[in-house]
Amino acid sequence: KNQVEQSPQSLIILEGKNCTLQCNYTVSPFSNLRWYKQDTGRGPVSLTIMTFSENTKSNGRYTATLDADTKQSSLHITASQLSDSASYICVVSGSWGKLQFGAGTQVVVTP
Amino acid sequence: GAVVSQHPSRVICKSGTSVKIECRSLDFQATTMFWYRQFPKKSLMLMATSNEGSKATYEQGVEKDKFLINHASLTLSTLTVTSAHPEDSSFYICSARLAGVYQETQYFGPGTRLLVL
């Protein structure tokens, strides 16, 4: 069973609207959680990284939250743009250097 | 931020031939690099961990004789797909680990699209 579960699997939103992606994990011990954006045919690019002591982290229009007690994280995209269309991957680091990847949420922003 | 490059970005080869993919950390030294494989609409799957100056560590189910990894320097790791077959067609992504004071971060390359005919 995957230790990192993301939802929804995909979503379509109108340009300018907000959306929230979810990530639940069971990885233990926990080191940090990252959100990556992966454009089609490209490698993942880091958006945010949070340790257990951090509850929220922002990067422009992207805001990630973390609840280490419930092992849940979310990524909120504000005022979506067409360029936000991509796959968003939640990655949890457990043992040092070992990353557990979620399957990703495919976001499509339409005009 | 740290930059990782891959070459080539895409390659088409005939079945039975070998293909080499390069992964370079451009502005930092990486004692550890990672090779991933990604199928369409699926997440990245770790294939192996490449350590500079020593043998790579392969994940369960990954054939080390088929996917040869060489990490000859602190900025270069190579993945060679030997005797490639159509089922090896995939998106291969490398990452390089940058150790910081408080945490380590992996920086990903742009990926290499392999198509075996």
Image (spheres, rainbow, N blue to C red):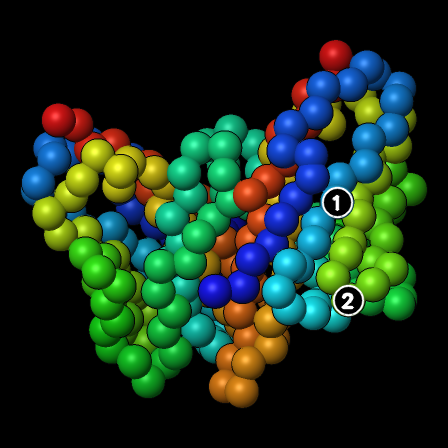
| Viewer-nearest residue: A99 or B105 | B105
Q: Position of residue A6 (x, y in %)?
A: 35, 49
Rendered image quadrant of residue B95: bottom right
Q: Position of residue B77 (x, y in %)?
A: 78, 54
Q: Position of residue B44 (x, y in %)?
A: 55, 45
Rate crowding at label 2 as few (under 14), some (14 to 19) or many (20 or more) other CA atoms within 10 Å.
Answer: some
Furthest-front residue in view?
B27
| Viewer-nearest residue: B71 or A107 | B71
Element at label 2 = loop
At x 54%, y 63%, the residue is B2
Choose the circle earlier in sequence order: 1 or 2.
1
At x 74%, y 61%, the residue is B75
Numbered tag placed on residue A90 in the rendering: none
Looking at the rendered structure, whether the residues under marks 1 and 2 are on a common chain is answered as: yes
Element at label 1 = strand
At x 50%, y 39%, the residue is A42
In three-dimensional space, the C-alpha distance between marks 1 and 2, rounded to whole angstroms, equals 13 Å
For the C terminus of chain B, give its image quadrant. top right
In the visual, does A16 lie left or right of B89?
left
Amino acid type, callout 1: Glu
Rate crowding at label 1 as few (under 14), some (14 to 19) or many (20 or more) other CA atoms within 10 Å.
Answer: some
Question: Can residue B19 be seen here?
Answer: yes
At x 24%, y 77%, the residue is A55
Amino acid type, callout 2: Leu
In the visual, does A103 lie left or right of B16?
left
Q: Position of residue B11 (x, y in %)?
A: 70, 25
In the visual, does B79 lie left or right of A48?
right
Q: Which residue is mark 2?
A: B74
Q: Chain of mark 1?
A: B
Question: Can residue B37 be seen here?
Answer: no
Q: Which residue is mark 1?
A: B22
Rendered image quadrant of residue B112: top right
